[in-house]
Amino acid sequence: MKRSFSALPVFFGILLLASTALAGGSEFPGDGAHGLGRGATGFTRADDGTVLLRNPALLADLWDDQALVGASLQLVDACFQPTGAYGWGTQEGVADFGEGPLYTNAGQGDTDVQGQALTRYTDEPYPRVCYQGPMPFLPQVALTMKLSDDLGVGLGFLPPDASALNQWGNRDGTVNTENGLRPNPLRYYRSHQNVSFFTLTGGVGYRISPLIRVGLALQWNLAVFESRTWTTPFTGLNPGDDVRTDVFGRDLFIPGVIASVQLRPIDRLDVALGFKWSEAIESKAKLDITSSAFGTGEVFEYIDGGSGELALASATVPTTAHNQTGIVRAPPIWAPQLSLGLRYSEPLKPRVRDWKLAREVAKGAVEDSMATERWDVEFNAIYFFTSVYDEVLFSSANAELDVKSISTAGEVQTIPDRYAGDCTRLDDNNNCIGRRETSTRLGGNDQIGLRLGGDYNLLPGMLALRAGLSYETRGQKPETLNVLQYMLSRTGIHAGLTLRIAGKTDLSIGFAHFIHENIRLQVNPASNLPPKYRSEEYHFASGQGIEAVGPGAGEVPVGDFDGIAGIEVPNAGQDTPGPYFINAGSFRYDLQVLSLSLSQHF
């Protein structure tokens, strides 16, 4: 198993993506409470300020000035069952996870100096790890104004509908098991993250003629984050050698643009085309790197069960290097996306052509689609250029890390030549004179989203019911799947309603249940997983139809595991996707979204 300190990009490869959200896979089909309820098909219909998200041309078709406040709450039930045991890749060592030192290879009858039996945990199967962070809460605020009958403008705080999850297991890199605290098998991704995200979108929509509307919106996004991740400077996986990285980073200007055009060739048909783009992220980052974070800092003393005499075990010394600097270059917040929308409606009243006259006749009433149509049905097709999520690059100065161990004689030794990343430039003597870079492959694939939904105005102008379906293809190669960036295919079932109160206030509720593709990633047969761990006890699916193929394999046609597709994981070398030991296992992801909004007409 090849594992060096270049594993550090495992963290950086997902850091900003998970914190600031993704389009496609990690962004659930939403578009506010109204859009969520109809299968996220609010693309061609002017209802509220959320039109800024994908179709600013519809600002010209909003009936009046509006203020929108809303929020989405995600109800997440997600777990990962890794394959293997704690003894995979480890050698003799001592670590402290918060409940006192544990000796990796404690033998039969070994005790501590007080006579308490020592726990040998190397043969314990990896535990199931579930999402333990807060329920994601996504607010929305938008203000829109009609400057004239044909011209509308809007301004909004409308962040992506992110479904990325920020904490698996405990914040400190451990996980609770029936035997006590143990190192989290997922810690090499990340153990915790806090993010402050801000986005401001301003747009304008203009009606050129009854046939054509055009719109443009500009975005300013910023992200500030702090996070904790783990790696190892050695080829082994001894927890006592783990390096903890506490990161603070920011990118204060991430521009984006949304453009759209909407056509109405006949009164009952709307056709829309839109494009969204966001600049890639380049974030300055400051790191506090603690080597041997689970180390005891002192020699471990115990009573040998065979001889009954005092024995010693060497240990590691936690040491922190403060304020290391670097730059993260990551894919954009939203993948570029091209949207097509078709909407057919059954009118109760003729389409408005003379807006001034229509307002006079309405006498203050809101004459939008909720009041002028009996029903409508809409279809959206979205092409996400998710292949931009191909790679994340972390660049840092050529700084040597401070890695220390303590021998049984009590001597502290500094282990040299431990660096973060691969050198970009060497001199004639192979000394590094450039920066160090680490790269993480994300395995992004372009994907297609299909959405179908509509409204039925049970009480026109008072009560609208809606429903819809959504579907997205895979947005990444399954072998690169991890718990923080779940971008496999999914189907959404949507429903919602809008109640208009006192003729001016719209209360909208949307709900969606997303059925995700659950995947089992099998350990590559070429890996060094010991034979004793290749059993059901250690969640290894031997004899289940997995085809034995060599390193670099992608998906193969195999049997299933209780309905879960089998996927081969490539061997983890420098030039192949991976890593193969921390994402091998069964993934389950279940998501419900409840959205509520209040829109006030003026």
Image (spheres, rainbow, N blue to C red):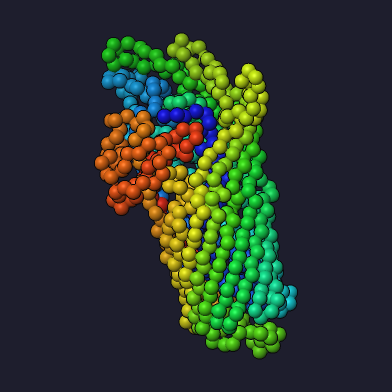
Q: Quadrant of residue 59?
A: bottom right
Residue occupying the point 69% across, 49% down: 253
Above or below, comparing residue 416 to residue 549 in the picture: above
Q: Nearer the viewer, residue 203 or 229?
A: 203
Image quadrant occupied by the C terminus: bottom right
What is the x, y in percent for residue 79? 39, 47
Above or below, comparing residue 236 to residue 142 in the picture: above
Above or below, comparing residue 248 to residue 45 in the picture: above
- Looking at this view, name the residue that lies furthest to the left: 543
Residue occupying the point 48% across, 52% down: 475
Above or below, comparing residue 431 to residue 260 in the picture: above
Residue occupying the point 52% across, 68% down: 380
Q: Nearer the viewer, residue 104 or 6?
A: 6
Q: Quadrant of residue 224?
A: top right
Q: Is residue 567 visible?
A: yes
Q: Quadrant of residue 272?
A: bottom right
Say how many tags the image has.
0
Q: Is residue 33 visible?
A: no
- Looking at this view, name the residue that lies furthest to the right: 147
Residue occupying the point 55% across, 70% down: 341
Question: In the image, is 230 to the left or to the right of 262?
Answer: left
What is the x, y in percent for residue 480? 46, 43
What is the x, y in percent for residue 507? 54, 72
What is the x, y in percent for residue 144? 67, 69
Image quadrant occupied by the N terminus: top left
